[in-house]
Image (cartoon, rainbow, N blue to C red):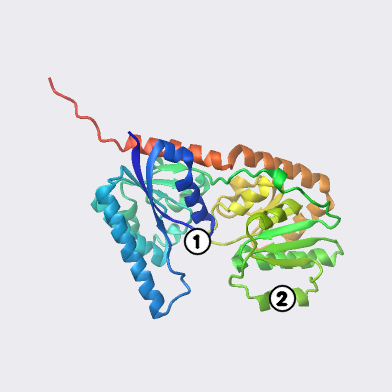
Amino acid sequence: MKKRILAFVQLPPPVYGQSLMNKYFIDSKLLNDNFKIRYIGLHYAPAKNKNKSGLIKKRTFFLNYYFVLFWNLLIFRPHLVYFTISVTGKAFLRDVIFVKLIKLFRKKIVYHFHNKGIIHYSGKTHLDKLYKLVFKNSYAIHLSSLLYYDIEKYVPKEKVFFCTNGIPVIDMAQFPKTLKNERPHVLFLSNLIASKGVWILLEACTLIKKKKIDFVCDIIGDWGDITPKEFNNYINVSELGDSIKYLGPLVGEERLQYYSNADIFVFPTFYPNECFPLVILEAMHFGLPVISTYEGAIPEIVDNNKTGFLIRQGSAEELAKQIEILISNPELREEMGNCAGNKFLEKYTLGNFENRMKEILCEILEKSKPAQKTEIV
């Protein structure tokens, strides 16, 4: 008989790394063939909606999820609850209430972390107590051993499993490189948030342009804490109009085609919650050398000087230098891109993710079995 797993997870929309990986999890044929998975998909009201109606909507969502969780714990009677918990802020305090309900039913929990930040709040007495309550007698899945430091205080290593993200393998024949770029194309893909390195990238582009090096930088993403006015003012003042192309928040095949037509992928992030960016995996899948930073698990994904370059956070000079090296050396771009593509196929496909998750869940369920009583003769 299949073991029952209740997945309590955030799902698209909106589409972002965690919600996408959660969807891959619940849709996985391999996992559903091996376990009886039932899921509760969480969709919360946007955080920016802070008026009275927005607050009522959030409370309604919360009460609805609480009731649905209660009903599934009572009727479905899962052997394991799989919970992609939020670890900081008001979202964590909300999730604590769900955890208490799960523990009230004495259900084993495995937390799958797609974010970080616990270490910055664990020194606060009230939060320290809550973290201890939440993670006591539970299991954890994290994206990389490089991120274990964030939960080390609360989850012993023997109860932690590591599973890298993975994405579907694409038929590259559908996305042929339609042109041989006379001007090398640099690609950046993320919402336009300062801590994702947008200003660092623009400053690096300015430095490269001053050397009269010809290139195009394609920027794809929705507006974040950077406004169109701020962005366009910088482009105009720095005279980058012929080198920077802002393409908006592209999705689907149109977005993938820009990976195919790019020569270099850059992601100079210093975003504090950065863990395991899917955009880097996508770039590697398309055989692009990647320039990124020592943030989260990125040093595990990008092999410095082999599949790309890792630079100091906030250093436009270093970013400009490495972009310039790759622009001026097409053979090195191809070599690094081939290494990146091979590493993706070896480690970061959706199949790799599914197989590893199956192993982890089987091991947790085996460990969770009650000890058999020994008969005394």
Determine whether, in the image, residue 242 is placed left or right of residue 107.
right
Tell which of 57 and 89 is nearer to you. 57
In the image, which disc is placed on residue 13?
1
Inspect the image, locate mark 1, and give the three-letter code of the amino acid beneath it. Pro
Label 2's element?
Answer: helix
Percent x, y of residue 128: 34, 59
- Quadrant housing the C terminus: top left
In the image, which disc is placed on residue 232?
2
Percent x, y of residue 147: 50, 50
Q: Earlier in the sequence, mark 1 or mark 2?
A: 1
User: Dots 1 and 2: beta carbons under 8 Å?
Assistant: no
Percent x, y of residue 119: 44, 57
Inspect the image, locate mark 2, and give the three-letter code of the amino acid beneath it. Asn
Residue at 40 percent of width and 39 percent of height: 361
The answer to whether residue 90 is above or below residue 107 is below
- Quadrant housing the N terminus: top left
| Displayed quadrant of residue 63 | bottom left
